Image (cartoon, rainbow, N blue to C red):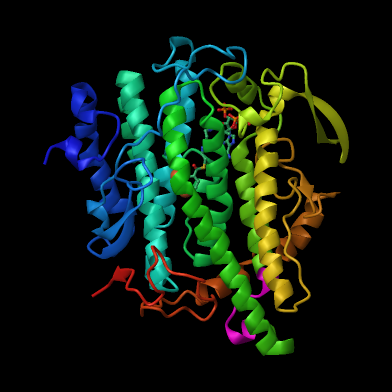
Amino acid sequence: MQLHEKIPNNVDLAGDRKLLRALEHWQPSFLEWWQTMGPESFQATDVYLRTAISVDSAGWAHFDYVKMPEYRWGIFLAAPEPDRRIGFGDLMGQAVWQEVPGEHRNLLRRLIVTQGDTEPASVEQQRLLGKTSPSLYDLRNLFQVNVEEGRHLWAMVYLLHRCFGRDGREEAEALLARRSGDPDRPRILGAFNAPIDDWLSFYMFTMFTDRDGKYQLVALAESGLDPLARTTRFMLTEEAHHMFVGETGIRRIVQRSCELTRKAGDRGARAEGGIDLPTLQKYINFWYSVSLDLFGGEISSNAAEYFACGLKGRANEKKFEDHLALEGVYRMVVPEGGGLRETDVPLRNAMNEVLRDAYIDDNQRGVDMWNKTIVEHGIDFKLSLPSRRFNRRIGIYADLSFTPEGEPISKEEFERRREEWLPSESDRSYVKSLMQPVFEPGKMANWIAAPTKGIDGKPLTFEYVRLA
Ligand code: BYC
Ligand code: FE
Ligand code: FE
């Protein structure tokens, strides 16, 4: 089979010999990376997966059994918008670029590499999870997420090869050479260097960290570099499923936790082998704060430059009235002398914070859904998102200590109360102790409720993964 047939695409790979050769060269390295760093123990297994074979509604969700190394990782751009123009910043109204303008080359390459790096990183982080899956349904969803993150890597590598020549090729190789958690050549961003080896963390990651992915992609979908905008638009259709896995996964744990809490009475959900709500709250505190860091600093000259140059916009830029953002300010709470003070930040420098705001609202909607489940079970407990200042490593709140309510406290007090707020060693080992595989079709581990429906109209008892 010709390579352009192996790689489903709508970018006329067959007609671009130079690009085809570059990808032909990269593909074996990708497959080797997938074999060594992709899901361990399941490479020869048949999985009921969705493959995108075109961008129209009939083609982007094609379901069948596939062995993961044979997944057809394709390259798809969303349909072009006729006469598209840059929608924000200093170049507002100019025609979008089909090629990278020389003066923005370094910044664009850096954005694309940072985005690309997270995709294989997440596959590496999750590579051992399959062995302890709570059901075949969840196992299949994990692998679906993993192959699609692999495709997102292809999407960025396509841009590197297509738009950046030699240094693009080098960056594409480097994306396969860095390793999550490796001290010498780690992945670029903070949250992508710790293993995700229990399923509670996996659902938290797909809820909170994949949602950072969504918002970064939504911002890049506004980019003046048209192929970048179009590829991220298509990635977002897949991203929705990743967040579905996270949000419903946690909802199912909350539901089961409530059922077991009622059964256990004073003894608490753990006595019945469930994950208690206070432990869930600590995992939320951890994964939410780690994911907030991925938006970068609150006050950022990088972000101002990305915006000014038309490289990265706000979420749904069209919703805003003023696309120049030269005059507005963003009212921000900044730390000062052990306390907090409000100050005005020039709007362009606050673009990371503007995007973070949209992200926070979206998360709150999810938490409200979980709380509805708790109320339905008549249990008096409310899950919440901690303050954006809590437990941060990046930006103006980094290296300072705050309660989950956002009150400044001393480092000593934070350390003293750390285990009230963040998962302790014993919480983690309790959660890990629950991670026993359940591989019988239709059955669920005791700590998680069944989903409300199956995949692609199939029943819950369907054999989503053939383990034979
Ligand atoms: N960790 O002005 P600042 C996804 C660095 S997730 C480590 O605050 P900027 C996915 C920064 O590089 C979405 N370093 O930051 C999810 C800078 O370094 P230099 C991924 C960090 O540039 C799940 C310095 O701190 N996509 O797709 O405005 C599964 C100060 O920079 C971090 C993108 O990120 C951090 N968390 O914003 C699979 C989109 N944050 O210059 C996939 C592309 C900042 O001092 N990236 N730094 O050496 C960007 O738009 C920007 O790079 C960021 C950072 C928003 C990440
Ligand atoms: Fe992704
Ligand atoms: Fe994702």
Q: Is residue 307 magenta?
A: no
Q: Which residues are magenta?
A: 270-279
Overall secondary structure of the magenta section: helix
Q: Position of residue 395 (x, y in %)?
A: 69, 36
Residue 85: give x, y in percent of width and height. Answer: 52, 17
Residue 182 visible in this rendered orientation of the protein: no
Left or right of 175, for residue 26:
left
Please tell me which residue is depicted at 67% across the width and 71% down the height of the picture: 373
Location of residue 143 by image quarter:
bottom left
The total of numbered circles placed on residues is 0
Q: Is residue 70 above or below residue 129?
A: above
Q: Nearer the viewer, residue 278 or 463?
A: 463
Left or right, 275 with respect to 408, comes to: left
Quadrant containing the C terminus in the rendered view: bottom left
Q: Position of residue 7 (x, y in %)?
A: 23, 40
Q: Could you tell whether 310 is left or right of 299 in the image?
A: left
Q: Residue most toward the left? A: 1
Which residue shows up at 73% across the image and 46% down it?
Answer: 388
Identify which residue is drawn at 79% across, 50% down: 402
Whether residue 433 can be seen here: yes
Residue in the foreground of this view, choosing between 201 and 327: 327
Give the left or right position of residue 87, taking residue 118 as reference.
right
Residue at the (32%, 58%) spot, across then down = 49
Point out the quarter of the image occupied by ligand 1: top right
Q: Quadrant of residue 230?
A: top left
Magenta run includes residue 273: yes
Picture quarter with the N terminus? top left
